[in-house]
C-alpha cells in the first residue's frame, strides 16, 4: 500500500504537470486544489526539488514548476523515491533483495513466484505510465 506521502506527491506532480511550460504554481494553489495539508506538501515539494524533479522561483510570480517534461517522468521513479522497493516481499525485490527466512527452497517457492509476477506487472505498469499520461487520461496496458 502506498503511503499518504507518495499519494500526495503524485497528486502534486500531476497538478504541476498540467501547468508544465506555463509558469509556476504556489504551494497554496496546489494544497487547495488537491486537498493536501500545506505543511505536509511543503516537505514533499522540497524533497522533489532536492531530487531534481522541481524548480522554484521566488517573488511575486514565484512558486514551483516541473524541471523535466512530464512525458519523461514515470510513476516508478516517484514510487521508488518515496517508498523504496515496489516489491511486496523482500525476496522478490531486485533493488532491495533479502533472502526469505521462512523458505527452505526459494527457487521453487510458489508464493515467491506469484509475488515476483506481481512485482513484474507493477514494475511494467509504473514504468510505462508517465505524469503526462495521468494529465490526459491515457491508460497503459
Image: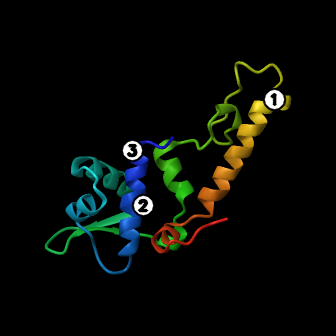
Circle 1: element type: loop
Dot 3, how many residues are within 10 Å of its Cα: few (below 14), some (14-19), or many (20+)?
Answer: few
Dot 1, how many residues are within 10 Å of its Cα: few (below 14), some (14-19), or many (20+)?
Answer: few
Circle 3: element type: helix
Query: Which residue shows up at 15% across the image and 70% down it?
Result: 59
Image-quadrant location for residue 115? top right
Vertical order, 88 against 45 (above or below): above
Q: Is residue 91 left or right of residue 76?
A: right
Circle 2: element type: loop
Q: Is residue 19 left or right of residue 59?
A: right
Q: Which colour scheme appears in the figure?
A: rainbow
Q: Earlier in the sequence, mark 2 or mark 1?
A: 2
Query: Which residue shows up at 49% across the image and 72% down it?
Result: 132
- Which disc is residue 4 wearing? 3
Q: Which residue does the numbered mark 1 point to in the structure image?
A: 109
| Residue 18 horizontal/vertical position (percent) | 39, 73
Quarter of the image with the C terminus is bottom right
Amino acid at each position: 500500500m502506498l503511503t499518504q506521502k507518495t499519494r500526495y506527491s503524485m497528486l502534486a506532480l500531476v497538478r504541476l504537470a498540467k501547468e508544465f511550460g506555463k509558469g509556476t504554481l504556489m504551494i497554496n494553489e496546489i494544497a487547495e486544489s488537491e486537498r493536501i495539508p500545506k505543511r505536509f506538501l511543503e516537505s514533499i515539494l522540497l524533497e522533489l526539488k532536492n531530487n531534481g524533479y522541481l524548480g522554484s522561483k521566488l517573488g511575486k510570480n514565484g512558486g514551483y514548476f516541473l524541471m523535466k517534461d512530464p512525458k519523461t517522468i514515470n510513476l516508478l521513479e516517484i514510487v521508488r523515491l518515496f517508498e523504496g522497493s515496489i516489491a511486496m516481499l523482500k525476496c522478490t525485490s531486485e533493488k532491495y533483495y533479502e533472502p526469505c527466512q521462512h523458505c527452505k527452497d526459494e527457487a521453487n517457492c510458489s508464493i515467491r513466484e506469484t509475488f515476483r509476477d506481481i512485482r513484474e506487472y507493477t514494475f511494467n505498469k509504473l514504468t510505462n505510465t508517465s505524469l503526462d499520461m495521468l494529465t490526459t487520461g491515457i491508460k497503459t496496458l
